Image (cartoon, rainbow, N blue to C red):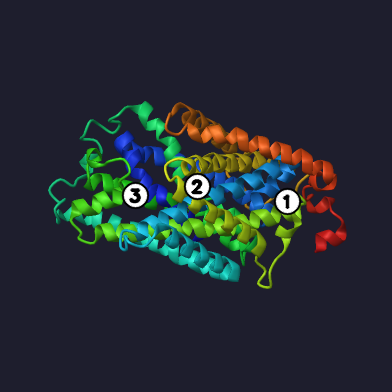
Amino acid sequence: MIAIGGAIGTGLFLGAGTAISKAGPSLIMMYAIAGVIIFFIMRALGELLTYRPVSGSFADYAREFLGPFFGFVTGWTYWLMWVVTGMAEVTAAATYIKYWWPHIPQWSSALAFLVVLFAVNLISVKLFGEVEFWFSMIKVTAIIGMILIGLGVITFGFSAAGDTASFSNLWSHDGFFPTGVGKSLMTLQIVMFAYLAVELVGVTAGEAENPRETLPKAINTLPWRIGVFYIGALIVILAVVSWTDFEPGVSPFVAAFAKIGIPAGAAIVNFVVLTAALSSCNSGMYSTGRMLRDLAVNGQGPRVFAKLNSRQTPAVGILVSVALMGFGVWINYVDPEGAFTYITSFATVAGVWTWAMILLSHIRYRAAVKAGRAQEAWFKAPGAPWTSWIALVFLVGVFVLIGLDKDARISLYSAPVWFAVLGVGYYVLRGRNPDAFAPKESIPPVKDREPEFAQS
């Protein structure tokens, strides 16, 4: 359910409205193409996870196969991605609450959500999983309900949308590419950002009860999850409501419910996007604590982050991350249209960087296996390493598209500053503790290992 929830977020419930207004029905194809790339990334990650499942896996694999510098940068970058995402999501959740209780101060709702989710993550990883399960269940139920209702409207013609609902809406309003192929391609950046957090499975791998069984299942079911929850939902929504009726910033689910004439449609969607925001913030707290602990254990962060509390959770790392997320609420209060926008824009670049590091680590891992320097994993990515190269080239193309879009270009401006800070920090810390930044050795094949290690 964490894997399912990671593939469904506010990018679909809210962001898809803007993308539809730019690309029309061709957005379906963009989601399908991006979905294939995401599957390549996740299969590459799956092979690395079965080679060696660890908590905080992205940084550890980058450290092992690309070098200590890339492990250091990836760990801190993924941590910052979730911190700024948490800032945005907890603030968004507070704004959704104002739909029902407009007189409640936004900062108080945001603070209450932070405290509750912090307690959930502090108590135990089991409680985190339980909460994330129900958050995911709400999102899944909402999408399946929308699909079934929409199919009913198209098939039987009931409700106010019955007269105009038809699959012909996918091509009858200026074609499948109504705004041109070029503008459709420009939405790929929006689409890829909607898939952020699907890689969260990798962070949870080190604490999975039975990773050998659950990890392949979670990754292999990704295609049908994307097919149903993204592509299937968009097909039905665009068949019920013509793409010309969508507006930027308006949830396509709200538009569809309004067209069908469901009285409580807006309240239902508001509740769903509220749980989507809280789910993202909940996952962010989980991820940040594990990333800080991974950096600390490897000597690339303050040692205090390596400590676990009596319930075996990285309490200090989570506490510091939550404190920074709370700082984001204050920034939003002071300047909601300025500084806060600049900070959160970095999350998108950080996510694509993480995916690129996964792919590069997988390519180097395959080379190490071929040379006999690393143990071969039993869950292999089909078509690799070519599929990893294809996905990597695609991500480079996404960066180019970001640079061409004047609205999204701002997310590239903050990246050089962050990486420059990390570069300075890396050389300072390496000078103080060279052993912590020594190259990490791979696990050799069984025949090349010592007998005692092979038996264990």
CA gap, disc 2 and disc 1: 25 Å
Mark with earlier residue (2, 1): 2
266 is higher (above) or lower (below) than 77: below
Q: Is residue 296 left or right of residue 236?
A: right
Count the labels in the image: 3
Q: Mark 1, mark 3: which one is toward the viewer? A: 1
Q: Mark 3, mark 2: which one is toward the viewer? A: 2
> Residue 13: x percent and y percent?
36, 51
Q: Amino acid at mark 3?
A: Gly
> Residue 81: x percent and y percent?
56, 47
CA gap, disc 3 and disc 2: 19 Å
31 is higher (above) or lower (below) than 224: above
> Residue 437: x percent and y percent?
79, 44
Residue 371 seen anywhere in this rendered image of the structure: no
Residue under label 1, please give it: 301
Q: Amino acid at mark 1?
A: Gly
Residue 234 seen anywhere in this rendered image of the structure: yes
Q: Mark 2, mark 1: which one is toward the viewer? A: 1
Q: Quadrant of the C terminus?
A: bottom right
Residue under label 3, please give it: 232
Residue under label 2, please give it: 196
Q: Secondary structure at mark 1?
A: loop
Q: Secondary structure at mark 2?
A: loop
Mark with earlier residue (3, 2): 2
For the residue carrying disc 3, how many other residues have a C-alpha within 10 Å: few (<14), some (14-19), or many (20+)?
A: some
